[in-house]
Image (spheres, grey):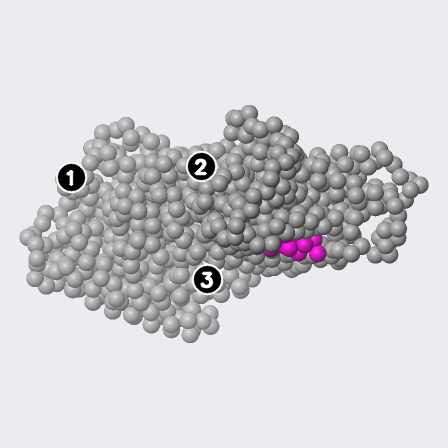
Amino acid sequence: MLNITSFIELMGAFVLFFAILQTASHRVDFSIKVYSIQSLFLSITIFVMGIYSNNAELYLSSFLTFAIKVIAIPYFLNKVTKRISIREKIVPYINMTNSVLITGAITIFAFFITKGDFASHEFIARRVFPTALAVILIGVFIMIARKKAIIQIIGFLTLDNGIILAATSITKGLPLVVDIGVFFDVFIGAIMAGVLIYRIRTSFDSLDTSKMSNLKE
Amino acid sequence: MLMLNNDLLNFNAVLIGIAQILILILIAPFVNSYINKIKSILRGQQGRPLFQGYKDIFKLIRKEVVLSEDASYISRFAPYIVFVSILVSACFLPVFSSNALLSFTGDIIALVYTIGLGTFFMALYGMDQASSFGGLGSSRDILIASLAEPTLMLVIFTFALQTRTTNISRIFIDIHKNGFLNYPVSYVLALMAFLIISVAENGRIPVDNPDTHLELTMVHEAMILEGSGRHLALFEYSSYLKLIIFITLASNIFLPIGVYGGIPHSLSSFSFLTILYAIAFYILKVLIFATPIAFIEISMAKLRFFRVPDFLMLGFVLSIISLVLYSI
Amino acid sequence: MAILVLTFLIFAILYRFINIKLTFFIQPVITLLILLYALFLTGIVLKHRIIFGFYHLLFLDSLNAVLIIIIASLSFLVAIYSIGYFKNELKSGLPENKVKEYYFWMNFFIFAMLLLSISNNLGILWVAIEGTTLATTFLISFYRNKEAVEAGWKYIIICSVGIAFAFFGIVLLYFVSSSFLGESLNALNWTDIMKVAPHLNKHILDIAFIFVLVGFGTKVGFAPFHFWLPDAHSEAPTPVSALMSGVLLNCALYAIIRIYAILNLDGQAYFANELLMFFGLFTVFIASIFIIKQNDYKRLLAYSSMEHMGIIAFAFSISTPLAIFAAILGMINHAFTKSLMFFSTGSVLSNYHTKKISDIRGLFKILPFTAVFMIIGVLAITGNPPFSIFISEFLTLLASFKANHAPEGILLLSFLVVIFIGFIRHFVGMAAGEPVLEKKKESIYMILPMFLILIVILTFGIYIPEDFKILVNNIVAIVKGAHGSKLQ
């Protein structure tokens, strides 16, 4: 009853669930935890996809996801959070209830637009693609709807997870060289954004990006 | 429906139905203690013994009931009504076989609202004693229940839509036969929505904390703060039963494996061993579903009360997505 | 070819350990050598049309040959200018460590740009573009004041998201190409994709192009994704602004054009053309509005960069040989002219310590050489003869009229007039008037690159070398998609 494609879809669905949960998060440490678990499911998805398509490169990719996104980045973000002692509340432009409602609409929208166009193509796990698209859009939404700089990073990382999920679902994984490059870039990007957060904190005395209004026109 | 009506006449079906209720009643305190035990172990404590739940109930039954002077007749009746309504809803529920005791009269919606009757009387009881805590608990509980209910219905509708019936037995049989994994995204989101609802309805962390008697955090405990003796025993037992009903629902919907459909209906093929096997399997599934609750309880802090609607909104949205994704 | 790329990576790390004074003088030498090497490679490309390196992951054809020449020559000019600029900064109390940091990220930046321009593999190209984002983030927030940090934050967030979308586009591209080329690294090689381009699913290609256009377009500064651009250009140290505006924008546009070429086989990219034309015109329009009401000369230059990118995109979208010729010329001209502008205004900034146009008066009397170069730059950038931008803009308009895009051409022309007025109004005000400061000494290192640029733009304005024409003809073939079929 539980064949391997539905298992991939199931894991993809968990990635989506944690993206939705991300929008309901009130606290920075909880957001980081959710991101970490989401990445864990992503790494499982990639691993199973490796078994399915018999592609050894995906095992490595799965391992990299685990090492970088489940352990390294959350560890680093936690460290940043502690160091600048953010008061751990997330300040939203759009409140939680509305955010979650909008997220729901986004998810349905993502499934709806991919219904006709992509269904005719041979994807390994056809339904993972709309799931991934939903995760991508939710990532963008988090970046727009939250004021705290660190949550905007998490939004970006969620978006990135969605893209990796999409890439794995429709292409059986990118070439290894590219994959490693992408992981490296995301990792460095997260670290640099973290350093910038530290500087924002020291020069603005807050992580609220809505206070950044010195540059206009 | 006809088949089920015939089953009514079947003595064995009735026996199985009664056995199901008895099993629910029997394991309900155990599951509660089991969750507590896991929590304790995860915290590095030894924890209460696994049969503490039964001992508590017996202890309470032996004690006398003390009622406040302001209490009306409602306080005298409410505990029984609560217990009976939970028990009746348990009768609608197919546990390890597809024939529930009352499956000919009730469907899944009846189950939900019979539980609702219990919630209502418990709230009345909370207010009836004229203690400030009771009223506070009642108002909070009703708020949670009213927010949780639509989500629960939506989750149920997702399954009703798939099986095209609201009869619980039919839904369960269909799910056990076809599986729900044709729609993995719907499945996951419905599962999570159901988890949220179960947590909210049963007063667990992060909505309510069943272990404390701190006035700021109490919901369920505040309502029965004035209860004593066998009244309290009934309330406690009702809450154990309510939890096991939700877990049973979850385990039969979300983990549709086992010998569910294989339970024979007629005397000729009646097999005691099959039933034992089904019961063992059922208990295993219950324990599987009870474990995450313990993990959630120790890994999360209780939400402040004004955050609870957000939490329930999350469940609501998840269930809507689940329903819509199923239909498109 | 690997030498080309690796040099900068090695030096980026090496500079950490070298004395700062030595660094000042090694950098121009290295970049000059690289420039010569790039010219040498271009000579080979002229003969052989295309050369490969490093397991076909790197390649050089006429299109990216032009790009590496731009990168190398501007790096050289910036290297010279940096000497003067940072000597000034060191005098006014900038710690030496910061200068070392600058050289590290600068070289890393140049490394990433070179990698992206000669990479044959679209995946690696993407990685390199993201690399440029990371390298420039710290350069933008170099001064660590409120504005700089804000600009850096906006930059990394907006560009990362944009680039993530571009990645999605590349994934889609890989998805369509891998059904012909197999699931391997080759399926992302541009030259290999071009071989099978006619068979690819047009519909998904169009969707991929939308993502790539939006993604890399963010980096190019197409409106409405341009919000980071003026901030970043105005807050970064002047040499960085020059390099970003002159080269980085071109690099990102180059990435779009590579993907565009896949769609454009046999000139079939109607949809892509329309998109490019829309973004081009819209960007010029937005830029013209902001230029008129601007009171910050570095931001004004940033908007002018947007304007030129818009014009170049517009030229590409017309897609006739003449228009592509104009676009390539425009890329080169804009790179040099805009650097001239940034260099001259950078000198103004390091003397006046304000970016407000209204605070600056009497430049002719305070910094005579700089003021002359600045006014020349203004005339050049707004498209006056005999400077080279006049040629490229004129050709763009001509091509649009010839290709039945007259209404769009007229629209563009009217925007250009508005921009011209804006520029003249702001900069003449700065140059003329009574001086508010004493006369300052001008560093030779800051004047020299401006002079070199002047020679280049005047030359290109009057005479276009024969070799360059051959290169551009090859590029026309590449962008029109004929390249792939000839390879076979």
Residue A184 x %, y % = 46, 37
Q: Nearer the viewer, residue A204 or C65?
A: A204
Q: Chain of mark 2?
A: A
Which residue bears the numbered disc 2?
Answer: A73
Residue C281 x %, y % = 40, 66
- The local secondary structure at tag 2 comes to helix
Residue at (56, 43) in percent of width and height: B66
Q: Nearer the viewer, residue B32 or B156?
A: B32
Q: Residues within 10 Å of mark 1 (few under 14, many from 20)?
A: few
Give the residues drawn in magenta, as a range: B110-123
As shown in the figure, which amino acid type bears the numbered disc 2?
Ile
Which residue bears the numbered disc 3?
Answer: C276
- Indicate left or right for C13 with B96 as reference: left
As shown in the figure, which amino acid type bears the numbered disc 1?
Gly
As shown in the figure, which amino acid type bears the numbered disc 3?
Leu
CA–CA distance in space, label 2 to label 1: 36 Å
